[in-house]
Amino acid sequence: MTLCHVAGMDAHSALTGYAQRVHTVFCPIVPPHVLDHLSRSGDPTLYEPARRTLEHDALQRTRRRITTVRMTAGTAVPRTGEDAEKKPQRTISDAGHKEQLPGTKVRSEGEGPTEDASVNRAYAGLGATFELYLSVFSRYSIDDAGMPLDATVHYGENYGNAFWDGERMVFGDGDGEVFRDFTLPVDVIGHELTHGVTQHTANLAYFGQSGALNESVSDVFGSLIKQYGLGHSAEAADWLIGDGLFTDRVEGTALRSMKAPGTAYDDDVLGKDPQPATMEDYVHTGSDNGGVHINSGIPNHAFYQLATELGGNAWERAGQIWYDTLTSGGLTPDADFAAFAGVTVSAATSRYGDGSPEREAVLKSWSVVGVSPAEAG
Ligand SMILES: [Zn+2]
């Protein structure tokens, strides 16, 4: 029953009706295998920031925190208005290169842009994420109950990552050598906030295949947030995660490619993108929580296949099937690829009908990546 790097326990309060979940929540965008490569570089301008980021991230993984989570729709705050009246409630803070959260408040909801581009990009990225979920899926913020969206920029010294800690988004500035400012790619912001959506819905355990699904769901919706904002169809979209994050020094375009997993980068310092596109190349590993950022390439590619097979805007039918899968209640936290695929088939069947082109396209996309959908139910 965990999100990202966690082992935890749930306690239910009869008084508040809310479940109190005690756990560590830490979801960084840059996986440890990339930072590991960097930390072994012979160049101190590269390995020093990478080692500091790794040390920081390892510490975060062992920290425990308490977050109160509204568990189900049954405990959600009653709706008071139509979707049109629902607005994001954003607060951006500046950590001033320290590692203390939340930092100093620099922009609140409705306030105009500041002179700090990182602040403005974080504000816009939170807004774009809120907008996709509300406009396309009628979801009112991360918890579907209007949860405020908080972010902190300029976290740490040359910190080479961005993460969701269960309550807020935190962005580093990057080291300027390999990574640029982490507020740059909007799909990274969407990816991180979607970990919050998963936390409040299917709650996929962050290990092995369920963990790779958790990662993949974040990539899928992160990419959809970017595509929606740009008005890109499935054909026009780049299907990259973290495009714009690497400096020119890196031989690579992004952290991951959903269109062609394994091809996002091939660099003498970073190593080669290890993502498989199909089950044939599934990576068995104990590191990175059982390869959650590696094997996510397989469900990522299945989604790409579905979206391009259907054509048009990926957030419409393909995105709807994935959103229904996440929110239908049909997934258990330890769902594997086959179980997840089975629920996508049921979701397509209930929304578009047995024998519909959508259902056929779902079956075909899983077949391309070598996953046989389990019988749902
Ligand atoms: Zn993630």
Image (tube, rainbow, N blue to C red):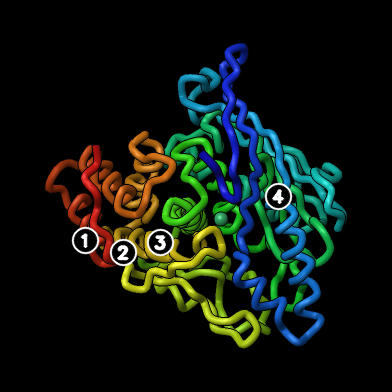
- Precedes in sequence: disc 4 or disc 3: 4
- Give above or below for 139 relative to 281: above
Mark 1 residue type: Lys
Q: Is residue 261 visible?
A: yes
Q: Closer to the N terminus: mark 2 or mark 4?
A: 4
- Dot 2 falls on a residue whose secondary structure is helix
- State the CA–CA distance, disc 2 to disc 4: 37 Å
**Left or right of 321: which side holds 202?**
right
Q: Are marks 4 and 3 in contact (CB under 8 Å)?
A: no
Q: In which quarter of the image is residue 88?
A: top right
Q: Name the residue under label 2.
A: 305
Mark 4 near ligand 1 (CB under 8 Å)? no
Q: Is residue 213 above or below residue 38?
A: above
- Out of 373 and 176, give the one closest to the viewer: 373
Tell me which amino acid carries mark 3. Answer: Asn
> Which is closer to the viewer, label 4 or label 3?
4
Q: In this view, does 98 lie to the left or right of 70?
A: right
Residue under label 3: 300
Q: Residue at x 62, y 66 (%)?
A: 32
Does ligand 1 reach within 8 Å of label 1's beta carbon? no
Mark nearer the N terminus (1 vs 2): 2
Circle on res. 62:
4
Q: Which mark is residue 323?
A: none
**Is label 4 in a helix, a strand or a loop?**
helix
User: Mark 1 and mark 2: span between their CA atoms?
Assistant: 8 Å
Looking at the rendered image, the disc whose residue lies closer to the viewer, 4 or 1, is: 4
